[in-house]
Amino acid sequence: MEQSFAQAVDRSTTASTKWLRYAGRDILPMWVADTDFPAAPEVLRALHRRVEHGVFGYTEVPESLLEAGAEYLDRRLDLPAPPQAQVWTPGLVCTLSAVALMLRDSGIDRLGTTLPIYAPFHQGPPGWGLRMQYLPLELVDNRWVPDLNQFREQVRDGLRAFFLCNPQNPGGTVWRRQELVEFAEICSEGGVLVCSDDVHCDLIIDPSVEYVSYASTGDHARECSITLVSPSKAFNLAGLGCALAVVEDQKLRRSLRKVLRQTVPHPNLLGFAAAEAAWRFGWGWFEGQLEYLRGNERLLREGLNAVPGIEVAPLEATYLSWADCRGLADYGVEPSELMAWFEAAGVGPSPGAEFLREGFARFNFGMHRSLIKQAVERVQAAAGRLPLK
């Protein structure tokens, strides 16, 4: 199955967001989180069938998709949520904004999240009047983990809402069950509402690691949380605008739906067809992709770790390697110059500053392996031109 990913696909003529950034420049785009792989054949067939129908008017969530969503949540997240708990939206980023607005309207003025963190977590909520409070992550035994005692103090100080990212983006850490249980106990004691973005939960790079959803850890976690999932990352469907918020509590669900009706458009009907096909029939294709990604991760990590001044921990999940490049300052590349240095080398990762962590870079390895090899060679060649320490 891995052989199906061996053919490179040219996206440069399709207005791809990833590839447009460096159009006309010899820079490999390794930034925004989508992959360069064609969709699963089962998804393509479902889309062809829906397009052949020929009518694309307003469309409600199909019952068959609600069933597929329930099966997915039960099987992959250990979350046997009833169909009425499903709130379908056109994307997770707009849903995060809707949740932030809902929190503000409920009287909450402060929102916690980890540091570093995916940009929409910290860029959007302040626009709705929420003040951000950060829980720093530190590298311990190759995992980016928080100090939960610090989180306990934040809750005692009045923190009442938290945006969780599991698996963590950036960094790829998968929260362990015991960590989530302790986190949930703190939230229960303080009445903290958690919105958990689990969009990367299927993309487990380290096969020894088990993903656990926050909402599955206990009654409070299930009833006082919003879980966000989508096939957009695992099946590369981000352009089809379809995501799912799981909200068990009826009052909370009603509040979220109210904000969504006021601020967010209806999901894409083609996204409905693609999501159902992916979750019902696409897992054979997905497993082949996962094995290919594991090979890419190993190649990129080993290649970057061969560069003095760059350190990349083994990744637990996502297809986004998190590189600590602060050591390059010893060779004349200051954190403020890091992106210019990578781009001059012919590689375009996401800057750590986007995630509130200077001196780091996030590399998307969801691409043809030959490009990973090129990226490694380019970075190593650029490092070879740096002055000796």
Image (cartoon, helix red, strand yellow):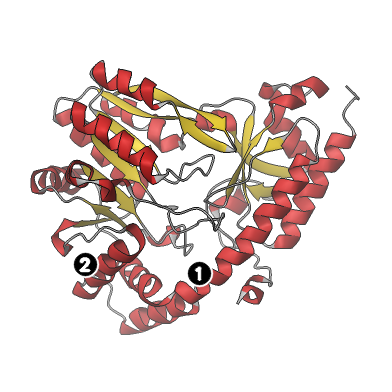
Question: In the rendered view, would you say 286 is above or below 200?
Answer: below
How many other residues sit within 10 Å of disc 1, few (<14), some (14-19) or many (≥20)? many
Q: Amino acid at mark 1?
A: Phe
Is residue 326 toward the left or the right of residue 72 in the image? right
Q: Nearer the viewer, residue 159 or 104?
A: 159
In terms of image quadrants, where is residue 305? top right
- Residue visible at 75% across and 47% down in the picture: 302
Question: In the rendered view, would you say 247 is above or below 281?
Answer: above
Is residue 37 toward the left or the right of residue 244 in the image? right
> To which residue does mark 1 refer?
286
| SS class, disc 2 | loop
Q: Nearer the viewer, residue 129 or 294?
A: 294
* Picture coordinates of residue 175, whole percent (x, y): 43, 43
In terms of image quadrants, where is residue 87? bottom left
Question: In the rendered view, would you say 127 is above or below 90?
Answer: above
Q: Nearer the viewer, residue 225 or 212?
A: 212
- Residue visible at 28% across and 69% down in the picture: 71
Q: Quadrant of the C terminus?
A: top right
What separation in Å lies between label 1 and label 2 (alpha carbons)? Answer: 24 Å
| SS class, disc 1 | helix
> To which residue does mark 2 refer?
61
